[in-house]
Image: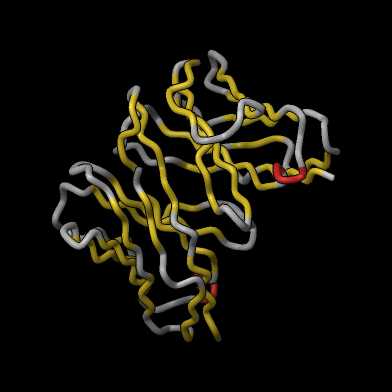
Amino acid sequence: KAGVTQTPRYLIKTRGQQVTLSCSPISGHRSVSWYQQTPGQGLQFLFEYFSETQRNKGNFPGRFSGRQFSNSRSEMNVSTLELGDSALYLCASSLALGGHETQYFGPGTRLLVL
Amino acid sequence: AQTVTQSQPEMSVQEAETVTLSCTYDTSENNYYLFWYKQPPSRQMILVIRQEAYKQQNATENRFSVNFQKAAKSFSLKISDSQLGDTAMYFCAFRGYSGAGSYQLTFGKGTKLSVIP
């Protein structure tokens, strides 16, 4: 079974632009979560989607948004990019909601904002 | 809000030796889940081991085992017979209920483990 895939793997943008990242979960997985990883802040939760609905959102500004499609694929969007948005963005999928569900991570998208 | 603390930013161990990584957490919940993830230089986050808080028995997975002390809110990872491929960042993570049916993963800052040949 294929793992979580994320596209693109690398991105370079300039301040003020917007960016869309994509995540395809493991087949059969319906929950998708997004995390931002930076050297200073570590791994921080962005949001979780299940059945096309956002179930939880971390402490990030409204410039960060996401959505989930009927096939469970998810996208996250960052508008008006800032230098501090440079990070590794990780997507994780699990079968369903629930604390007992293990999240499996994709390889990440590395975003550099210049 | 839950917090996860890994007090050892960096550690090293000789190949074939045993090493223990520490993790403590803070929560008022009774039912939750704990995980250790490994992130090698490739940046792919890989699940190492998980523990359910309601289980008293410590989880084991081949060379990896945990020492789960619920009252002390401690969750350490022991790696036996360390191998060069164990070189990575190790993250301790807590998964607890955050509302609307969602369970959020909260990570520690990580411990960078180097296995020395």
Instruction: Spot the residue most to the top.
Output: A70
Q: In percent of the image, x 65 and y 36: which residue is there?
A: A6
The colouring scheme, among rainbow, by chain, secondary structure or one colour, is secondary structure
Q: Is residue A2 visible?
A: no
Q: Is residue A84 left or right of residue B114?
A: right
Residue at (77%, 44%) from the top-left corner? A83
Residue B52 in sight:
yes
Please provide percent x and percent y for residue B43: 61, 55
When the figure is inspected, residue A11 is found, relative to residue B101, above or below; the finding is below
Q: Residue A29, how many percent across, how many down?
A: 45, 28
Residue B63 image offset from top left, x and y in percent? 35, 69
Total marks shown come to 0
Q: Nearer the viewer, residue A2 or A65?
A: A65
**Relative to B87, is B65 on the left or the right?**
left
Q: Nearer the viewer, residue A22 or B62?
A: A22
Foreground residue among B112 and A42: A42
Q: Is residue A9 above or below residue B13?
A: above
Residue at 50% over, 15% down:
A52
Above/below status of A71 relative to B104: above
Q: Position of residue B41 (x, y in %)?
A: 63, 62
Q: Residue at x 58, y 20 (%)?
A: A67
The quadrant of the image that shows the C terminus of chain A is top right
Placement of A42 over or under B83, stated as above or below = above
